Image: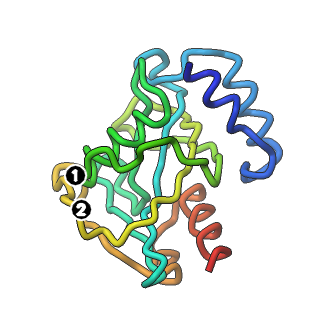
Amino acid sequence: MLYDQIKKIIGVSICDSESTYTNFLKRLEEGTFTRDENKQTHFCAYFLPYNAKDKKVFIVHHKKSGLWLSPGGHIDEGEGLLETLNREIDEELGVKQFFHKAPSPFLLTITPIENKVQPCKVHFDIWYLVDTDGANFNVDPKEFHETKWLTIDEAEKIVTDRPNRKALEFVRAQK
């Protein structure tokens, strides 16, 4: 199921580079898509909350990575993309069943993991835009040092992670 879902969304037009496209296809064929199956390299779902009215994004100062990032996380064994998105949005933002059907991702990136906290070495990131004003957020303080709604310009000043910066570039282009 997960193989088919990922295979269906991989396209050159949403990859941040041609090598990302090639590496996504190659990694997909290796199998073992989740952290439970392969601790070092696996697929993740990230979601960028965006308030179109205020033109702001919601970013988090993640405790494990020490970075300002978009919320999201690993796909668990047995989950599809919709289940992962809804579980992660619930765990990190306290919103249950945000999506009723799987949205289309807007970006695919590959992130080398360079911290000593996790056994992860590479994340294959599937990015989703979450249109929200955040009024129903109930953020889990165990996950983050801090959270903020920021303009793209403000976010770009503190977000250093390349895939997250690519996601911000996408939102900037939508304005």
In this rendering, position of residue 147 left or right of residue 16: left
Q: Residue at x 78, y 50 (%)?
A: 17
Rendered-image quadrant of the N terminus:
top right
Counting from the top left corner in percent of width and height, residue 139 is at 21, 58
Q: Residue at x 67, y 16 (%)?
A: 30
| Amino acid type, mark 2 | Phe
Disc on the earlier residue, 2 or 1: 1
Residue 166 sits in quarter: bottom right
Give the alpha-carbon distance from disc 2 to disc 1, as whole Å.
6 Å
Q: Secondary structure at mark 1?
A: loop
In this rendering, position of residue 169 left or right of residue 58: right
Q: Which residue is mark 1?
A: 94
Colour scheme employed for the rendering of this structure? rainbow
In this rendering, position of residue 106 left or right of residue 97: right
Mark 2–mark 1 contact, CB under 8 Å? yes
Q: Which residue is mark 2?
A: 137
* Vertical arrangement, residue 172 with respect to residue 7, above or below: below
Q: Residue at x 46, y 31 (%)?
A: 120
Residue 4 sits in quarter: top right
Counting from the top left corner in percent of width and height, residue 90 is at 27, 46
